[in-house]
Image: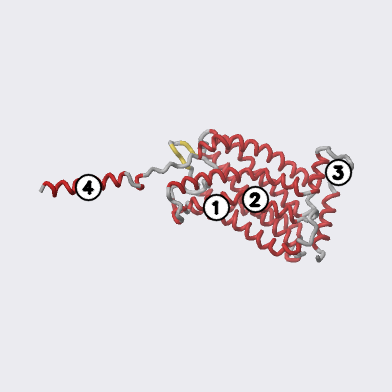
C-alpha cells in the first residue's frame, strides 16, 4: 500500500520538474532596438540630413537654373530630389525621438510618419516613371500618348504624388498611436499606420510596402532593361543616358529591399520556421538595422549624379567657381539635351 502511494508521487514530482526546465518555459530575450537607436541614429541621421539637404538642394538648383527642364528626364530627377527632401526633413525629428527613447507627441509622430511614407512611395513611383520614360524614348514610342510628352511628364509626376498620398490614406484615417506607460511611442523601424488593437490589420502595411516599394519597381526595371540590354551594348558608355537611371533605381532597390524582406519575414514569421527565440531576435535586429540603412538613401542620389552625369559635373564645377572657361546660360543646356536625346533615341543601331 505504501509503495502504491509513493510511486505515483515520485513520478509526478519528476514530471513537474521536467516541465519546468523544458523549452516551453524558456524566456526569450527580445532585441533591444531602443539601445541601438539611441546610440547610432542621432549622430547618423544628423549627418545624413546635412549631407542630403546640401546634395539635393544642389540637384534642384542645377536642374532648374542651369540644366533646365526641357529634357523630360530632368523633370523626374527634380521630383526625386523633392521626394528625398521630404524624407530628409523627418530625420532630425527621428534622431530626437531615438535619443529620447521613442517618446514623442501623437500629432508630431503622425506628421513624421506621413512625410516618411510619402517620401518612400513617391520615390518608388517616380523611379518607375523614370524607367518607363527611358524605355519609351529609347524605342521612339512618344505616339503612344495622346498628349504631348512634356505634358505627360508633368501630369505623371503629379499623379505619382497624389497616388503616394492616397496609398497611406486608409491607415492614416484608422491610425491609433502606440502607447506604453501612458506615453506615445514613435519609432522608425516598423510601420505605425495601423489600428494597434486590431491584429487583422497588421500584415496590411507590410504587404503594401513590399508590393508597391519593392516588387512593382523591380518588375518594371526587369522588364524594361531586359529588352534594352542587347541594344544598350552597342552604345557608347560615356554618353549612355540610361546608365544614371538604371543605377538610381537599382540603388533604391538595394537599400530598401533588405528592410522590406526583413519586415515581411518578421510579420509572417509564424508561417515560416522563424518563430523561435533565436530567429525572432535576429529578425528584430535585421528590421532595425536595415531600416536605419534604408533611411540613409536620401543622400545617395546626388552622389550618383556627380559620379555618373558628366553634364551635372560640369555645372557643379562652374557653380563652385572651379571652372571659368565659359559663362553659364540657362537656355543652352535644355535645348541641346533635348535635341541630343531625340536624335539619340530616334536613330536605329
Which residue is at 14% across, 47% downward?
5
The one of 182 and 6 positioned closer to us in this rendering:
6
Q: Which residue is mark 2?
A: 252
Marks 4 and 3: CB-CB under 8 Å?
no
Q: Which residue is mark 1?
A: 261
Is disc 2 placed on a helix, strand or loop? helix
How far apart are labels 1 and 4 at the CA level? Answer: 47 Å
Is disc 3 placed on a helix, strand or loop? loop
Is disc 1 placed on a helix, strand or loop? helix
Choose the circle earlier in sequence order: 4 or 2.
4
Q: Quarter-wise, where is residue 291 in the image?
A: top right
Choose the circle earlier in sequence order: 1 or 2.
2
Q: Position of residue 262 (x, y in %)?
A: 53, 50
Q: Position of residue 91 (x, y in %)?
A: 61, 39
Quadrant location of the C terminus in the rendered image? bottom right
The one of 301 and 97 positioned closer to us in this rendering:
301
Choose the circle earlier in sequence order: 1 or 3.
1
How far apart are labels 4 and 3 at the CA level? Answer: 90 Å
Which residue is at 69% across, 61% downward?
225
Which residue is at 72% across, 41% downward?
57
Choose the circle earlier in sequence order: 4 or 3.
4
Choose the circle earlier in sequence order: 1 or 4.
4
For this orientation, the residue located farthest to the left is 1
In this rendering, the label closer to the viewer, 4 or 2: 4
How far apart are labels 1 and 3 at the CA level? Answer: 46 Å
Circle 4 crowding by C-alpha within 10 Å: few under 14, some 14–19, many from 20 = few
The label shown at residue 76 is: none
Q: Which residue is mark 3?
A: 328
Q: Is residue 115 visible?
A: no
Q: Which residue is mark 4?
A: 12
How far apart are labels 1 and 2 at the CA level? Answer: 14 Å
Circle 3 crowding by C-alpha within 10 Å: few under 14, some 14–19, many from 20 = some
Amino acid at each position: 500500500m505504501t509503495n502504491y502511494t509513493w510511486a505515483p508521487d515520485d513520478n509526478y514530482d519528476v514530471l513537474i520538474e521536467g516541465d519546468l526546465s523544458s523549452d516551453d518555459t524558456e524566456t526569450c530575450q527580445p532585441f533591444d532596438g531602443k539601445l541601438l537607436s539611441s546610440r547610432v541614429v542621432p549622430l547618423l541621421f544628423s549627418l545624413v540630413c546635412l549631407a542630403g539637404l546640401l546634395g539635393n538642394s544642389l540637384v534642384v538648383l542645377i536642374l532648374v537654373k542651369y540644366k533646365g527642364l526641357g529634357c523630360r528626364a530632368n523633370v523626374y530627377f527634380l521630383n526625386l530630389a523633392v521626394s528625398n527632401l521630404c524624407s530628409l526633413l523627418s530625420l532630425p525629428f527621428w534622431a530626437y525621438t531615438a535619443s529620447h527613447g521613442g517618446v514623442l507627441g501623437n500629432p508630431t509622430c503622425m506628421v513624421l510618419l506621413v512625410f516618411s511614407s510619402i517620401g518612400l512611395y513617391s520615390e518608388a513611383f517616380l523611379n518607375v516613371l523614370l524607367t518607363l520614360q527611358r524605355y519609351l524614348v529609347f524605342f521612339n514610342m512618344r505616339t503612344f500618348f495622346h498628349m504631348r510628352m512634356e505634358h505627360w511628364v508633368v501630369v505623371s509626376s503629379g499623379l505619382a504624388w497624389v497616388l503616394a498620398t492616397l496609398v497611406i490614406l486608409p491607415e492614416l484615417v484608422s491610425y491609433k498611436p502606440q502607447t506604453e506607460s501612458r506615453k506615445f511611442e514613435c519609432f522608425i523601424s516598423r510601420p505605425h499606420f495601423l489600428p494597434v488593437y486590431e491584429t487583422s490589420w497588421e500584415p496590411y502595411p507590410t504587404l503594401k510596402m513590399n508590393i508597391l516599394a519593392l516588387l512593382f519597381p523591380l518588375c518594371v526595371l526587369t522588364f524594361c532593361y531586359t529588352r534594352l540590354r542587347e541594344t544598350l551594348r552597342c552604345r557608347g558608355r560615356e554618353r549612355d543616358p540610361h546608365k544614371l537611371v538604371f543605377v538610381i533605381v537599382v540603388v533604391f532597390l538595394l537599400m530598401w529591399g533588405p528592410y522590406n524582406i526583413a519586415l515581411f519575414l518578421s510579420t509572417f514569421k509564424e508561417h515560416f520556421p522563424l518563430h523561435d527565440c533565436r530567429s525572432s531576435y535576429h529578425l528584430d535586429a535585421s528590421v532595425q538595422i536595415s531600416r536605419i540603412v534604408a533611411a540613409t538613401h536620401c543622400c545617395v542620389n546626388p552622389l550618383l549624379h556627380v559620379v555618373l552625369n558628366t553634364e551635372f559635373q560640369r555645372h557643379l564645377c562652374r557653380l563652385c567657381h572651379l571652372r571659368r572657361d565659359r559663362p553659364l546660360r540657362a537656355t543652352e543646356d535644355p535645348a541641346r539635351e533635348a535635341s541630343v536625346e531625340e536624335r539619340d533615341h530616334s536613330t536605329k543601331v
